[in-house]
Amino acid sequence: MVVVMKVGATPQEIEAVEQMVRKVGGAPHVVSGVLRSIVALVGDDERFLDLPLSTLPGVETVQRIGKPYKLVARELHQAPTSVRVGNATIGRESFALIAGPCAVETPRQALAAAEAAKAAGATILRGGAYKPRTSPYSFQGLGKPGLEILADCREATGLPVMTEVIEARDVEHVAAVADALQIGTRNSQNYALLSEVGRSGKPVLLKRGFSSTIEEWLMSAEYIAREGNANIILCERGIRTFEPMTRNTLDLAGMIVAQNESHLPVVVDPSHAAGRRDLVEPLARAALAAGADGVMIDVHDNPSEALCDGPQALLPDDLARLGAELAKLAQDLGRPMALPES
C-alpha cells in the first residue's frame, strides 16, 4: 500500500503516518517528490487496511498496490529513477557504456582494460576483484589486492569503479573502495547479501539470476530498497534455456518489461549473455535499439590468456569500434550517449 500525501504536507504529518504504520509492525518508506511525498507501506497489507490512515491530516489518498514489490514498482514512482555512480549517471535520458575486465588479473592488464574503456566512451569501469566461479579450481579473483588495483585504475583514468561483492562480510571493505557494488547472477537471491549492500548506501547493480523470473528479479531489488537504498541499477544478463550454442539467452523482452514494471534503470550485459565475442557487438546494438539504459562490456588486451571469460571479451580496438557505433546509433535514435559529469 502507499499513502499519497497532499501537496504541502508537513514533516510532522508525514511522521504521524509513519508512526501509525510502525505500531502494527510495518515499515514505512518516504519517497519525496517535487510537489508531494508518498509513504510506501512495507509489510502485511491486511493490517494496514484496518488503520484509519485516510483520516490523518495531510493525507490525500491511500492506495493498495497489487505488486509484491512496492518500493521499486512503477506505481510508487512514475518518473524513472536515475542513479549516480561517481561522476556518471545511469538513466533514461542517455545511453551509458560500462566496460572493463571481467576479472582483475594484474595491474598492467587492468589498466590496459581501463584505458580501453575510457577511450571507447565508457563512463564507468567494471572489474571483478572477487569472482564466484562454478568450479572451485577456477580463478577466484585477487580479492583485496584486486580492489587496490581498481582504485589505481580510477586514479589513472578518472572512471568510477563498479565491482562485485559476493559475501555479506565483504561489503564494508569493498564499499570502502568501490563507487558501486555489483551483485552477480549467482547471488541474486542471496537475501542476506542484498540487505547488507542495501545498508551500505552505495549504488548497486543487480544482475538477474540466470533462472530468475522478472518478478523474482524485482523482489531481489526490493530487498535492497527496503534498507533505504533506492540507487539500484537492474542488469539483464541472459537466462538459462535449453539452447546450448550460446552461454545464455539474452531476454530483451524481459529488459523492457522490467523497465515498465519498475522505475529503476535497466542495463544489458551482452558479454555474459552470449559468452561469445562474435555476438557481443550485435547484441549491444540490439539492446540500445530496444531501449536499454546502457550496456556492460568485457574487454581484455589478450583474451586468449585471460584467467576468466576470455572467449567473450572484446579487444580494445573492438571496443573502440563498438563505442563509436553505439554513439552514432544513439544519436540516430535521439538518445545521446552518457558523458562524465563534473
Image (spheres, rainbow, N blue to C red):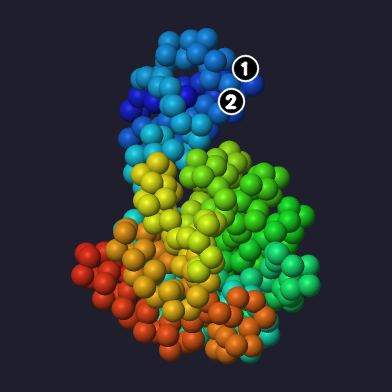
Circle on res. 263: none
Q: Measuring from the top left, give residue 98's x and y in whole percent.
A: 47, 70
At 43% from the left edge and 66% from the top edge, which residue is drawn?
295
Q: Are marks 1 and 2 in contact (CB under 8 Å)?
A: yes
Mark 2 belongs to which amino acid?
Answer: Gly
Question: Which of the 4 image quarters holds residue 309?
Answer: bottom right
Q: Quarter holding the C terminus?
A: bottom left
Question: As displayed, is residue 18 above or below residue 178?
Answer: above
Residue linked to disc 1: 24
Mark 1 crowdedness (10 Å alpha carbons): few <14, some 14-19, many ≥20: some
- The x, y position of residue 283, in whole percent, is 39, 69
Amino acid type for the residue under numbered disc 1: Val
Picture residue at 57% right of the left edge, 50% below the top: 211
Mark yes or no: residue 86 visible: no
Q: Is residue 264 visible?
A: yes
Could you say whether the residue bearing mark 2 is in a helix, strand or loop? loop
- What is the number of the mark on residue 43? 2
Would you call the spot at circle 2 few (<14 residues within 10 Å), some (14-19), or many (20 or more)? some
Q: Is residue 258 above or below residue 327?
A: above
Q: Give the quadrant of residue 336.
A: bottom left
Percent position of residue 161, x then y? 57, 70
- Foreground pick, 155 / 50: 50
